[in-house]
């Protein structure tokens, strides 16, 4: 098989389809390099002294793990000096982080969840990094929250890295979703699947069923019908998978289909849902749509939401198109 590295892929996309401007290519390569560093830190586990709590909390009042903090620092440092960014925002920081004065500024905004699936870090289960790229609106500063408050449809790129048995980078620049695997000997991400397509139908769904009593009626109905299997109205058996790392659950769906749900429930209704719009739901929604799937809150397309604040939360239902549409139809 001919080896196509991430660098080569991006240069070819730039030439062939003008999907990637030079500064965006630099940005994506810098993020990929940072993900390699995070992958090394995650892979060392207890030997690296990186497991356990950091002893601090983030803006969402969640206890930070040492690896959450380290991954955030790796991404901040890697992206500070290249001249491609106007500003950065992260799950782990209350306010956007400006580019230090000594470095030139660029036209893009980068948002990320540096290490998604924090509850899985200490138990050696897959975690990942999720990121989204926007353009900084003319006249606004990259350290101003307002610059970031754009609908998901404005994203110019999105991706995630998954740190599992192998490390993978799954990326879109709006011309399909493509998967790369880290070749640890080469030190490069190598294209392993071009134009990933999510099957339209599925018999697999992912949801934290311990919240069942808190779900809204449409989701209760959908899951109840799946559980009834062949004997129920769906006439087929379903399978459940829940890793509790969105990256791992969505990656499975990108690979073989399925539907991922963190719906609105009575526990999280006040805050609008559990998952964050700008650096979890939007980038994953973009990747899933570019792979032929769908991403909705149950009531509207995730990428159409105009955010009111940086750390806004939303209900999430995404994956195989026909199944997402069924859940959405129950909401109607
Ligand atoms: P995190 O970004 O702090 O790790 O939280 C997000 C995670 C998702 O990866 C995952 O889908 C969800 O939270 C799991 O939630 P729960 O523990 O309620 O099942
Ligand atoms: Mg997360």
Image: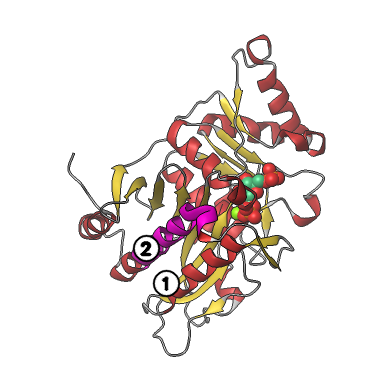
Whether disc 1's CB lies below 8 Å from ligand 2 is answered: no
Give the secondary structure at mark 2: helix
Find the magenta span and give its range. Answer: 27-47
- Marking on residue 41: none
Q: Quadrant of the C terminus?
A: top right
Name the residue rendered at 46%, 52% in the picture: 43
Mark 1 lies on residue: 78
Are discs 2 and 1 less than 8 Å apart at CB? yes
**Residue 43 located within the stretch drawn in magenta:** yes
Q: Nearer the viewer, residue 198 or 252?
A: 252
Furthest residue to the left? 2
Residue receiving disc 2: 33
Secondary element type, mark 1: helix
Q: Nearer the viewer, residue 295 or 110?
A: 110
Image vertical order of residue 308 relative to residue 327, above or below: below
- Pinpoint residue 182: horizontal percent, then vertical percent: 34, 50
Q: What kind of secondary structure does the magenta stretch mostly adopt?
A: helix
Residue situated in front as seen by the camera: 252 or 218: 252
x%, y% of residue 317?
61, 40
Name the residue located 44 percent from the left edge and 78 percent from the top edge: 80
- At a point 54% along the width and 66% down the height, the residue shown is 70
Choose the circle earlier in sequence order: 2 or 1: 2
| Residue 123 shown left or right of residue 1 in the figure | right
Quadrant of residue 194 in the image? top left
């Amino acid at each position: 098989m001919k080896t196509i590295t991430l660098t080569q892929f991006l240069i070819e996309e730039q030439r062939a389809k003008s999907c990637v401007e030079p500064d965006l290519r630099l940005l994506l390569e810098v993020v990929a390099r940072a993900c390699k560093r995070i992958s090394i830190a995650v892979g060392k586990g207890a030997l690296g002294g990186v497991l356990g709590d950091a002893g601090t909390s983030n803006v969402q009042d969640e206890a930070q793990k040492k690896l959450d903090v380290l991954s955030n620092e790796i991404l901040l440092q890697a992206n500070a000096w290249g001249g491609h960014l106007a500003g950065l925002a992260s799950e782990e920081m209350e306010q956007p982080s400006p580019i230090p004065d000594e470095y030139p500024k660029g036209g893009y905004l980068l948002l990320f969840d540096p290490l998604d699936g924090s509850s899985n870090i200490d138990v050696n289960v897959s975690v990942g990094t999720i990121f989204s790229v926007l353009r900084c609106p003319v006249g606004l500063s990259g350290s101003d929250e307002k610059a970031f408050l754009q609908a998901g449809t404005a994203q110019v790129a999105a991706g995630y890295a998954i740190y599992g048995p192998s490390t993978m980078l799954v990326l879109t620049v709006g011309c399909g979703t493509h998967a790369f695997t880290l070749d640890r000997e080469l030190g490069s991400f190598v294209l392993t699947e071009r134009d990933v397509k999510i099957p339209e139908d599925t018999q697999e769904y992912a949801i934290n069923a311990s919240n069942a009593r808190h779900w809204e009626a449409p989701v209760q109905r959908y899951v109840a019908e799946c559980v009834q299997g062949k004997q129920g109205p769906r006439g087929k058996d379903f399978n459940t998978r829940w890793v509790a790392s969105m990256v791992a659950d969505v990656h499975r769906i990108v690979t073989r289909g399925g539907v991922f749900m963190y719906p609105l429930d009575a526990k999280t209704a006040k805050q609008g849902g559990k998952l964050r719009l700008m650096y979890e739901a939007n980038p994953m929604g973009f990747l899933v749509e570019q792979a032929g799937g769908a991403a909705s809150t149950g009531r509207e397309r995730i990428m159409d939401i105009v955010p009111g604040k940086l750390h806004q939360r939303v209900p999430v239902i995404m994956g195989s198109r026909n199944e997402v549409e069924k859940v959405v139809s129950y909401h109607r």
